Amino acid sequence: MRRKFVVLLCLVALVVSGVAAQKKVELKIAWWGSQVRHEATIKVIDMYQKLNPNVSISYEFAGFDDFWTKMTTMAAGGQLPDIMQQDYARITEWQSRNLLEPLDSYVASKTLDLSDVAKPIIDSGRIDGTLYAISLGSNSYSMVLDVDAFKKAGVPLPAQDWTWDDMEKIAMQIHEKLGIYGIGGGFEVDELAWKAVYLSDGQYLYTPDGKSYAYKDDTLLVNNLKMLQRLIKAGAAPSYQEYLATFGGTTGNIQMDAIVTGKSAIEAVWSNQVVAVATAAGAGRNFAVVHLPRLKHGGQPGNFLKPSQFFSITSQSKNKVEAAKFIDFFTNNIDANLILNAERGVPVAGKVRDALKKTASPVVKTVFEYLDRVAKDAAPTPPPEPARHAEIRANVYVPLIREQVFYGVLTAEEAAKRLRSQGMEILKRP
């Protein structure tokens, strides 16, 4: 009788453990990006759910600016997703608001296996020694060139160490020869040019404590803005109005980019977006990828290597362990990454990277080769922007540079002066 009772207890235990193993889990994931990214990520989510039938994953995605608006609203209501895509420039802000889960314990338990990821890549997601984010790929800003447009115009492709003066000259030549834009409008809306010109001069935007601008002279920014204004005035770059109306503006819709639609020969994009550009442009298009322009030939580049994006687990998540398991899958599963196709940057896990190199399409190989070049010729990676950077971008840089300089309301000098004074007010606040 006792033996039967023990057997019965064992059977009950097995049933209970089976039920526990199949406990239903609901996860929510949010990201920003192009349609190419959305479709690939959804396929990987579907793959994960088939492998883990007890896990149900909902998701949402948006363009870059809309994403942060949504996440801020959700954070205020305690409704953040379990996993959110994070940006190198914003991670400090979100961690300072206690909205991100520390991840070191999940790494220690191997729930999140980073044994195949290089330490510098892991450390890019640390703040004050604690891991808050997992890099989804290595990345750098880049200039994409329409090779066929250059050939048609009879303009040679630029060298990797081309300068801003070279870029202006080339953009003007292509416009004169072909009647299209030499360069699309990316630099008008992205503060990357602001950062790049100072990096090329060996300077960062902010001091290490995040309480001040590190650069003392506005001349480099002013000169860059004036160059962009000259291109717009000459018709070699779209006006800000046309950029918003015709080429997708700030929506992040790569399908509308001028270079995709054949209306420009050069476009400034992050290297992980090159795949999306080529995919949206369609078969038969030929693209090359070069460094950002620099201040002088042979000088320090404005490029630096950075995490393309991160995945973070939010502190509001109710399923943190399951969220960590999904990020582990996203990082280490080769089949999943064959679907993702390095669209978020060169994969961080060595075995995944090696697998993609063997099967990579020509455009993915172009991105891999570009990142290899940047690794040998880049400025030191600046620290993440201070928590106040997002506020400066939204409330000062965008309304001053985007809207007033490129609508012709302010001169470059006036805008740079206000960017400094108003930005400093924000940085100095307690």
Image: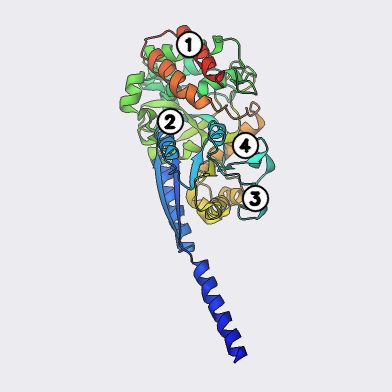
Q: Quadrant of the N terminus?
A: bottom right
Tell me the tag on residue 418: 1
Image coordinates for residue 39, horizontal then vertical, percent: 40, 48
Camera-side residue of 345 and 233: 345
Secondary structure state at the residue bearing disc 3: helix
Give the mark, 3 or 4, whose residue is nearer the N terminus: 3
Q: Quadrant of residue 266?
A: top left
Give the mark, 4 or 1, whose residue is nearer the N terminus: 4
Residue identified by numbered label 4: 372
How many discs appear?
4
Name the amino acid, label 4: Asp
Name the amino acid, label 3: Ser
Name the amino acid, label 1: Arg
**Residue at the front extreme?**
2
Residue identified by numbered label 2: 148
Give the mark, 3 or 2, whose residue is nearer the N terminus: 3
